[in-house]
Amino acid sequence: MKRVLSIQDISCVGKCSLTVALPILSAAGLETAILPTAVLSTHTAFKEFTFRDLTDDIDGIADHWKREKLVFDGIATGYLGSFRQIEQVERIFSLFDHEGMLKFVDPAMGDWGKLYPGFTPDFARRMGELCGKADIIVPNLTEAAFMLGEEYRENGTEREIRDLLKRLCALGCPVSVLTGVSFEKGRYGVAAYDSRKDEFITYFSEHLPHTFHGTGDVFASACFAALMDGQSLAKSLEIAVEFTMESMRRTLAQKEYNWYGVDFEAAIPKFLKLLGKI
Ligand code: PXL
């Protein structure tokens, strides 16, 4: 069984970060180790939240794993709360690096042109440096703009998105993926650039008239899971988009759906079908 590591916070209520990544990666048949960077009562879109920073525990946990000679086939990171945590992730990347280990970075920092509470443009630039050390990154248009120090634009032409993907790869990662992209009314999805093959890939699905919290985390977890399962980049993007769409449809089908996260749990059977596991 492949062993992967997911590094991000635990938002106890909110259906994001680790409470999304762990069930999705486990469902895909991956042994999933977790490294929680903080414990919050809820994610930060709630009016209030408690926040327990776990920065001081991170190095010790990683050092113990190294002494145990644990090997990870892939490491994925999401929401990180401080400059020091970015440094710690870089240390973990080099501590556990080996030929074939996939380093997957979701620079979860913002949406709709704004950074989440507590993040600054300087932090976003630093996150851009971490992205440079990854094999694949999956920012949305907001995160991409802040990491590159560019003005946020809600969308772009195919040519503009291609150029943006190339600037993201110029941070140092061979593959960049942009989420929340649309070239045509009613079609919404992702675009990617593989600089090693000079290959541009897109995958679009229907556009639902609603935005939800946590869909970036659902997409990132499913994409990482599919790649670790050995699927191609194009297939992994398709699986992750379709699973995210199904999660949103399942949420909207509830009469009183919750506002803070999607019902990805109900879409897990579809995810396993997309992966060809059932
Ligand atoms: O979904 C990204 C995310 C992860 N973790 C925390 C968050 C958010 C988004 O708001 O607040 C704590």
Image (tube, helix red, strand yellow):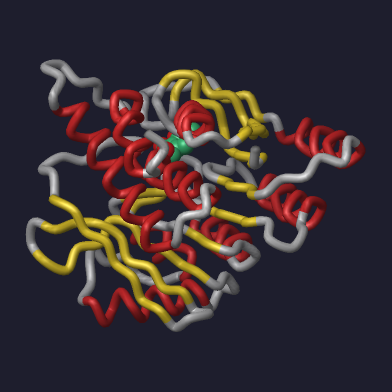
Is 194 placed left or right of 102 in the picture? Answer: left
Is 142 placed left or right of 34 in the picture? Answer: left
* Residue drawn at 57 percent across, 32 percent down: 9
**Residue 52: percent from left, percent from top:** 63, 24
| Front-most of residues 179 and 67 | 67
- Count of all numbered marks drawn on residues in the image: 0
* Residue drawn at 47 percent across, 72 percent down: 168
Is 194 placed left or right of 72 in the picture? Answer: left
- Image quadrant assignment for residue 179: bottom left
* Residue drawn at 36 percent across, 25 percent down: 46
| Front-most of residues 232 and 205 | 232
**Residue 3: percent from left, percent from top:** 67, 40
Assign ligand 1 to one image quadrant.
top left
Q: Quadrant of the C terminus?
A: top left
Task: Work out whether 14 lies above or below 187.
Answer: above
* Residue drawn at 40 percent across, 79 percent down: 199
Task: Work out whether 206 lies above or below 169.
Answer: above
Query: Going by the picture, which residue comes out furthest to the left?
Result: 185
**Residue 238: percent from left, percent from top:** 31, 54
